[in-house]
Image (cartoon, rainbow, N blue to C red):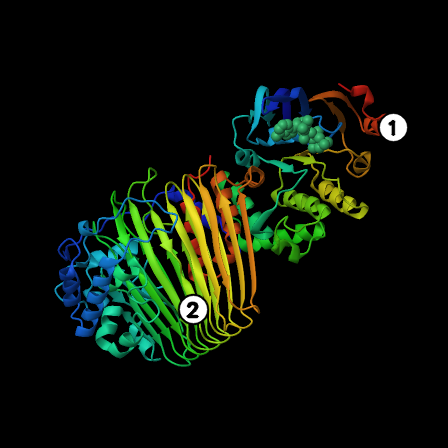
Amino acid sequence: MVQIKNLHASIAGKEILKGLTLDIPDGQVHAIMGPNGSGKSTLSYVIAGREGYEVTGGEILLDGQNIMAMAPEERAAAGLFLAFQYPVEIPGVAMTMFMKTAINGIRKQRGEGEIDALDFLKLMKKKQAELGMSDEMMKRAVNVGFSGGEKKRNEVLQMAMLEPRMAVLDETDSGLDIDALKVVADGVNKLRSDKRSFLVITHYQRLLDYIKPDVVHVMAAGKIVKTGGPELALELEKTGYAEYAA
Amino acid sequence: MSSITQETIDQVEALGGKYEAGFVTDIESEKAPKGLSEDTVRFVSAKKGEPEWLLEWRLKAFRHWQTMPEPTWAKVNFPEFDYQDAYYYASPLTKNKPKSLDEVDPKLLETYEKLGIPLREQEMLAGVAVDVVFDSVSVATTFRKQLAEQGIIFCSISDAIKEHPELVKKYLGSVVPYHDNKHACLNSAVFTDGSFVYIPPGVKCPMELSTYFRINEMNTGQFERTLIIADKGAYVSYLEGCTAPMRDENQLHAAVVELITHDDAEIKYSTVQNWYPGDENGKGGIYNFVTKRGMCEGKNSKISWTQVETGSAITWKYPSCILKGDNSQGEFYSVAITGNYQQADTGTKMIHIGRNTKSRIIAKTISAGKSDSTYRGQVKIMPKAINARNFTQCDSLLIGDQCGAHTVPYIESRNATAQLEHEATTSKIGDDQLFYCQQRGLSEEAAVALIVNGFCKEVLQNLPMEFAVEAQKLVAISLEGSVG
Ligand SMILES: Nc1ncnc2c1ncn2[C@@H]1O[C@H](COP(=O)(O)OP(=O)(O)OP(=O)(O)O)[C@@H](O)[C@H]1O
Ligand SMILES: [Mg+2]
C-alpha cells in the first residue's frame, strides 16, 4: 500500500527526516512510537503533502504510484487521510457543510457526481452515532469550541466519513478519557479491512491494547531505528527511549 | 445559509476568476454633451420633463457643488477626477419609452439575461420585483401592477416625479440634503434615474424589491437616486445589485440613497456591489462614491443595511442611520473584499437621537493582493438619547502580506447612560487552515472560499435567501487567484 524509501525532508533549512524507510502492506496496522521531536508529525505532514516541508531525497509510493508531485487534495482523493495531532478550527463553517464539501471535493476529483443530499445525511447520522457525536455538535463550526477529546473524536468521524485507503493517525489517543479511547479505537477497528491500512502514531502502549498493530516501529532523530511486533511497544513502556538517543 | 456549497465552488472554478459582467452591449444611445455645466443640468432636467421646482433644486445643488472641495479624509488615493471629461446622461435610444417589456429593446433584455437578471416576469425568481437602470434611465420595472393593488409604489424615480410629485417633493433631500458632501451634491445636480418605493401604512411588502444598475456607456457617470419610504407599520426588503463593462478608464458612480421609516416601520436594504474593479494592474474600474443614509423617523422603527462590496476600483461609502424615533434601531452588516489594487474606505454612522435607541455594526473586511481596505465608523450619542446602546464588531482578514486593513472608529457619547461596546480583530488565513481543508479534499481556492465565507457568515446570513447563495459565489469569485 504505502512505501516510503529513504525519505529526507527539512523545514526552514533544518533536516528533520533523515533517511526514513517504511513499508506498510495492504490491510496492516503499523504503529510508530518515538520521543518528542523525533519527527513523527513531520512524517505525517510530508506524507500528506504539506507546503513548506521540503523533500530533499527519497520518495513515497501509494499503491506503487509516486505521490511526491501531487497536491494535498490530490493525495486525499487518492485515498490518503491524516488525523491531525492538533485539529484546526474553521470559524463560521458548520461541520456538516465542511464534511459535505470535503466529500464532494474528493468525488469531483475522482470524476464522480455530487453525493445525494439525503444519502449524505444518512451516512453522517450513522457515523455520528457510532462515535457518539450529537447533531448539535455537527451544527457548530469545525472544531470551534470543541474540547480536546471532542476534536480527536471529530478526526475519527471525518475518517469514517471519507473512508480512506490509507489513514495516518497522529496521536489521536492523546487527551482522550478512557471511554472515549474505546469509542475511538472501535471506530478505527470498524474500518479495518484487508484493503485499508493504518499508520498509528502514539506515545502510549495502552492504545495498542485496543487497536492491535501488526508491526511497531521506533522512530528517533528522523529515522526508523527499530521494528518489531506488538511486544516492542510493551518493551518500550519499560525501557523508554534512552537506548535510541541520538 | 450557513456556508458555501460544493456547487458554488464548482461554479467558481468554472468561472476561472474572470469578471463575468465585463461585456459591452452594442446599443445606440443618446447622450448629453460632454462636460458639466448649468446647461448639463438643464439638459438632464429637460430630458426628463421635470417640474420647475426640481430644476431649481438641481441648479442650487450644482452651484453649491462648484464651491465644495473634494473630500480628502478617506484613506484612498487616486488622480483628480476630470469632471469635464465625462458624460452625465446616456440613454438607450428608443423613440418612446417602452410601456411593457415587449417594447424593450431585445438587446437590453439579452444583456440582463447574460447577467442573470431575468426581466420577463414569467421567468423571474419567485417573489422578486425588479427595477433596472441601464446607464442613466430605468428600462423596466416588473410586478408594478401587482404591487399597486396593495398601494405599494415601486417605480423609477423619474416616473415618481411625474406621478407622485407630492411624495417626492416631501422626501427628496430630507435625509441627505443636497449640500451634504461633494459627491451627494453632484448627484443632486445631475441624478438621472433610480428607484422609488413607497409602502403605505400597515403593509408588509409581499416580495423582495430589487434594483439592478448597469453602466454600459463609455465615459459615462451613473448618478442614481433612490428613495424608499416605509409608512407607519410598513415593511420592505430591498436589494440592489450592480455591474459594469471592463474598461481601461475610470468611471464615476455617485449615487444617493435615502430611506425613511415612520412609526413601527422597517426597511431592510441589501447591496451586492460588483462594479468592475479594474484589472490586475490597477487600470480602470469604477469609482464608487455613494451616500446612503436612513432616517428612523418614527418610534420603534428599524433600518438595516447589509452590504457585500466586492467590486469597484475605489469604494467610498458609509450607509448610515439617524435614530431619531424613540426605541428605533439601526443595523449595519458589511463584507468588503478588495484584491489587486482596489481601495475601499467604507463603514457606517449611527447617530443616536431618540431614547432607548440601539445600533449594531458587524463589519468584515477581507484584503488580498496589493489592496487596501479601511473600516471607518462613527457612533454618536446625542444628549437626549437616554439608554442608547451600540455594539460594534470589526474583523479583518488578510490574505498575503502586501495588503492592508485598517479600522478607524469614531465614538462620541454625550449621554452618560449610553452603553457602547467595540470589538476588533485582525487575522490571516492560516496555512494550517488551508492545509487542513486540502487534506480533506478541497482545492486551495475552494479552501479559501470556504474559510472566507465562514468568516463572513454573520453578514451573509442577513441577506435575503435568494441572494445569499449569489453573494457566497461572488465572495469566492472575487478571491480567485489571490492565494499561492
Ligand atoms: N516550522 C518549523 N520550523 C522549525 N522547526 C520545526 C518546525 N516544525 C517542526 N520543527 C521541529 O522539527 C522537529 C520534529 O517535530 P515533530 O512535530 O515532527 O515531532 P514529533 O515527533 O511529532 O513530536 P511530538 O511527539 O512532540 O508530537 C522538532 O524538533 C520541531 O521543533
Ligand atoms: Mg507530533
Residue B123 percent across, percent down from the top left: 33, 63
Q: Mark 2 or 1, which is nearer the eye?
A: 2
- Label 2 crowd (10 A; few <14 / some 14-19 / many >=20): many
The disc labelled 1 sits on which kind of residue? Lys
Look at 47% across and 67% down and name the residue there.
B330
- Tell me the element at label 1: helix
Q: Nearer the viewer, residue B277 or A90?
A: B277
Task: Determine the quadrant in which ligand 2 lies.
Answer: top right
Look at mark 1 in the image and give the residue it sits on: A238
At numbered mark 2, what does the secondary structure look like: helix, strand or loop? Answer: strand
Which quarter of the picture shows residue A161?
top right
How far across and how far down the image is residue B442, in percent? 52, 41
Chain bearing mark 1: A
The numbered mark at residue A37 is none
Q: Which residue is mark 2?
A: B322
Q: Residues within 10 Å of mark 1 (few under 14, many from 20)?
A: few
